[in-house]
């Protein structure tokens, strides 16, 4: 154990303490509206390298740089397309990450060796306050151990990183619950590399939107994907997760039947009554997004061996839920 990890509620003093640690090259877990982030000074490679070490993150998976005002953007990038300004105006602070050509201030450690940088301005009051107090941008991946479901509460972060970091700022449960939408720009179009709280439908008011193939299709072993994060196994609890392509009674009958013969089976249904093997993961995509990671962690806690999940809608925020589930389930979909 390197540290006695402190968990402090978000207030003026804890923000000052976080900023002081960050200025001294330490890494700190901070709340955002999407998931908790593991933050370091984005302009200090030493701190950034610590993030990779603590998370056990592959070196070629780049980090998102978090800013608190539009003034912080120009020094970090070589160019700001007009559409990026429009999207920033409409969706920042919020769960949208945009890819820009990087300036020399952004190291290869942050960019994973790419010549681009991912930037977002969060909506979370706590995240904004910490970045402002620091005065420098924060590089922050999700504050889970690599491969585990992303943390949506301070307790999740504590479970994964207790003893490895000095401080977790507790801002309560994340309101979105899945990571930000990641987009890049190509030929005047918006390309979604990772779906999230800002949906394809919302973005399509600004330009034509394409959803990258890797969002819903398993990349081949050596395929070069635009967003390196998409190629790793992700979000997985210890249990084996399966997506069940059925709704309503067809879903519940299938799960109930299997539960009669299989021990430690959990079924996550959309708006189902919580009885027997069933847990409710929410009747709308927004609720499902908020609950998904937390329920996957809970399944582990209660010793589930198998988790069956009702297939989510593939539109709106549902696409983000589906994308995370596909990876948690290693792309296994059961036709019923
Ligand atoms: O909501 C979020 O985005 C959270 C909170 C903490 O802000 N952060 C987060 O970071 O999810 P992380 O590191 O878990 O995911 C970053 C994703 C990865 O899939 C990564 O490959 C992609 O963004 N990414 C980062 N920089 C990129 C770049 N230059 N080009 C393409 N994809 C990039
Ligand atoms: Mg992550």
Image (tube, grey):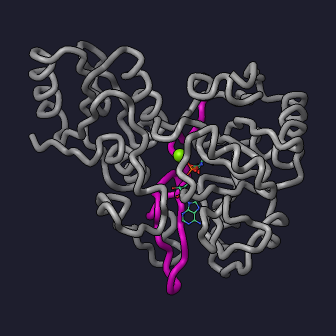
Q: Residue at x 43, y 50 (%)?
A: 317
Location of residue 31 by image quarter: top right
Say whether residue 261 is left or right of residue 307.
left
Q: Is residue 330 above or below residue 118?
A: above
Extreme residue toward the bottom, this view: 187
For this rendering, which residue is in front, 210 or 29?
Answer: 29
For this rendering, which residue is in front, 9 or 146?
Answer: 146
From the top left corner, tell me how far across and down residue 306 is, in percent: 25, 26
* Magenta-span inclusion, residue 111: no
Give the number of callouts.
0
Q: Residue at x 35, y 56 (%)?
A: 315
Q: In what quadrant of the picture does the N terminus appear?
A: top right
Location of residue 310 by image quarter: top left
Say whether residue 15 is left or right of residue 152.
right
Q: Residue at x 85, y 54 (%)?
A: 136
Say whether residue 179 is left or right of residue 220.
right
Q: Residue at x 42, y 67 (%)?
A: 225
Q: Is residue 60 above or below residue 280?
A: below
From the top left corner, tell me how far across and down residue 240 is, in percent: 27, 31
Q: Is residue 104 above or below residue 260?
A: below
Location of residue 222 by image quarter: bottom left
Tell me the magenta residue range: 173-201
From the top left corner, tell me how far across and down residue 125 is, in percent: 76, 41
Q: In what quadrant of the picture does the C terminus appear?
A: top left
């Amino acid at each position: 154990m390197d540290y006695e990890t402190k968990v402090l509620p978000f207030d003026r003093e804890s923000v000052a303490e976080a900023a002081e640690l960050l200025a001294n090259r330490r890494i700190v877990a901070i709340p955002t509206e999407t998931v908790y982030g593991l933050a370091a000074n984005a302009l200090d490679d030493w701190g950034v390298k610590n993030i990779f070490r603590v998370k056990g993150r592959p070196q070629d998976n780049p980090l998102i740089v978090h800013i608190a005002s539009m003034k912080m953007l120009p020094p970090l990038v070589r160019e700001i397309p007009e559409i990026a300004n429009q999207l920033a105006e409409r969706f920042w602070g919020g769960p949208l990450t945009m890819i820009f050509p990087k300036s020399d201030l952004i190291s290869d450690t942050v960019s994973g060796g790419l010549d681009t940088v991912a930037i977002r301005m969060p909506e979370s009051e706590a995240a904004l306050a910490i970045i402002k107090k620091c005065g420098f941008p924060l590089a922050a991946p999700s504050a889970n151990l690599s491969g585990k479901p992303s943390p949506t509460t301070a307790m999740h972060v504590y479970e994964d990183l207790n003893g490895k970091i000095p401080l977790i700022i507790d801002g309560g449960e994340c309101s979105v619950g899945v990571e930000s939408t990641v987009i890049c720009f190509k030929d005047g179009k918006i390309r979604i590399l990772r779906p999230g709280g800002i949906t394809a439908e919302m973005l399509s008011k600004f330009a034509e939107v394409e959803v990258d193939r890797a969002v819903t299709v398993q990349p081949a072993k050596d395929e070069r994907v635009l967003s390196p994060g998409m190629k790793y196994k992700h979000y997985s609890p210890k249990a084996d997760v399966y997506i069940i392509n059925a709704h309503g009674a067809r879903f519940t009958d299938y799960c109930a039947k299997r539960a009669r013969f299989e021990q430690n089976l959990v079924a996550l249904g959309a708006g189902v009554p919580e009885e027997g093997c069933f847990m409710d993961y929410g009747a709308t995509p927004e609720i499902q997004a908020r609950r998904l990671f937390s329920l996957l962690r809970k399944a582990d806690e209660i010793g589930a061996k198998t988790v069956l999940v009702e297939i989510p809608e593939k539109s709106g925020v549902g696409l983000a839920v589906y994308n995370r589930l596909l990876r948690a389930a290693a792309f296994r979909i059961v036709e019923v």
